[in-house]
Image: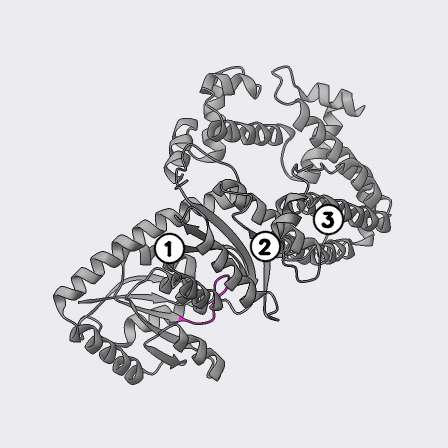
Amino acid sequence: MRRILLVDDEDYILELLQEIIDWEFYGFQIIGTAENAREAMKIFYREAPDIIITDICMDDISGIEFITRIRLQNSTAKIIILSAYDKFEYAQKAMKLDVDGYLLKPINKEELLSTLLEVQKKLESKNEYQDQIRYLQSSLSNLQRKYLEEQLIWIYKNGTKSEAVDIEMPGFWAVASIQTIVRNEIVFLERQIKNLAGVEAFTLFVGDGLFALLLYSSNQNGNQIKAALEQIKKKYCDDEKSVLCGVSNTDECKELSQICENSRRALNLLFYKNTKHYITNAVIKNMVQSSRREELNQEQFLLWIANNELDRCREHFQEYLKRCADRNEDKNNVDQYFNQCAYTIKSYVQEKGSITEIEKLIQDASLALRSTEVYDLFDHCLKLIDGDSFHLKKTGIIIANAQDYIRNNCYDEKFSVDLLAEYLNISKSYLSKLYKDETKESIWNYVIRVRITKAREMLVNTNATNYEITKAIGYASEYHFSRAFSKIVGVSPSTYKKLYLQKK
């Protein structure tokens, strides 16, 4: 039986594929279906299918990029593409990636079966013994490469060493950060580099259209790495569709964690400057090393919105982005700051459609490749504010001040609603009713959620015992803490920690 994986982002297509022919009769077995490329990659690593039938246009990760990732694993799997597009450019890209069939939707049973039988012949024409050897070699190579790439991605994203990560091999590492629109170009570049003797290349997908090409050479003088970097620079520097936005070379950095950190800083420069850049190591060396994250003064921001001073909000956000550009702030911090602003704005939006739109804008901001795009999304958020909602400014400020006080004081066992009401200078009964009417939950529900959030952070980031966590978040007994945690999270504190460690 030839094992088949089906991939399409439409449920009815997957159902149709499973029913359109008698798979078992013709010698095939469907070992999995996936609605997106991420899910499909997991099945691919686990099941190693002989044949993959995939859609070419999918959300998040396209079919072309999915095939690219499969080919990077040196897989011998046969691939058949399904597409609603008959444009030559799609077929051309597919053929470059060595696919075995290109079928148009709607699916034609005879064409699909004919293509499958042709692929089956190709598979059966090979010597069975050679197939087994090749399969074992490919599986071993895939597992080794997958492990290495997972470790490299961890180092690239965190930028620091960890006792759990131990791949500092003797020799030289280098990183090239690339933003590319024609994504499968990276495959051919990697193949070119592999032709250089003594150079290993690992392609990491670190964002939408962003790649980190990590190069390794055991040679002690790093000449092979320098030659590879020159090839990358020549291919990408003047290309209109792709941008080489950062290189960390071997002259000054030999530690993998340090060159990954430098490459991420180079990506930040590209985010703030709307031009193409080739960032040399000299530029990276002069970058500001420390990240100075700012906390949003939500009370002040809320007052500007409540007083309909939206231009001051715009000016504030523009100045913030300028300060970030001056010090090359990490984009993750910009995303968090945008989220704080957007959620504050959301409290002044009335229509359900506008609330949904703000939530979508928050997602869009995390994918933005330019700081100007983030500002435009922020401005869009402000424009969604309903002028009729400003009558809520008094209650909105009370709720904001109440939540701010809770976040800063609820970890004390002596915390109470009486103290909160006294701080806000209003009666306890009025505060309780107002809070419930505006937020649809009680004050104590919010207090418990804040406490449990901190407990979850302590469970995964510290070695604190349940008793120590109980006292740190303001509970009188370990029993009450465990009960509240289980009610909100769904599992006990100890089970939650075990599940987290298993995922790591």
Residue receiving disc 2: 246
**Residue 481 versus residue 181: which sits nearer the camera?**
181
- Lower position in the chain sequence, tag 3 or tag 1: 1
- 437 relative to 135, above or below: above
Residues at marks 3 and 1 touching, judged by CB atoms closer than 8 Å: no
- Give the tally of numbered discs: 3
Report helix, strand or loop for mark 2.
strand
Of the residues shown, which amino acid type is indicated by label 1? Gly
SS assignment for the magenta stretch, majority? loop
Residue receiving disc 3: 325
Residue receiving disc 1: 198
Residue shown at 53% from the left, 43% from the top: 253
- Mark 3 or mark 2, whichever is nearer to me: 2
Report helix, strand or loop for mark 1.
loop
Of the residues shown, which amino acid type is indicated by label 3? Ala
Residue shown at 30% from the left, 63% from the top: 75
**425 lies left or right of 201:** right
* Quadrant, the N terminus: bottom left
Residues at marks 1 and 2 touching, judged by CB atoms closer than 8 Å: no
Residue range (magenta): 55-61
Report helix, strand or loop for mark 3.
helix
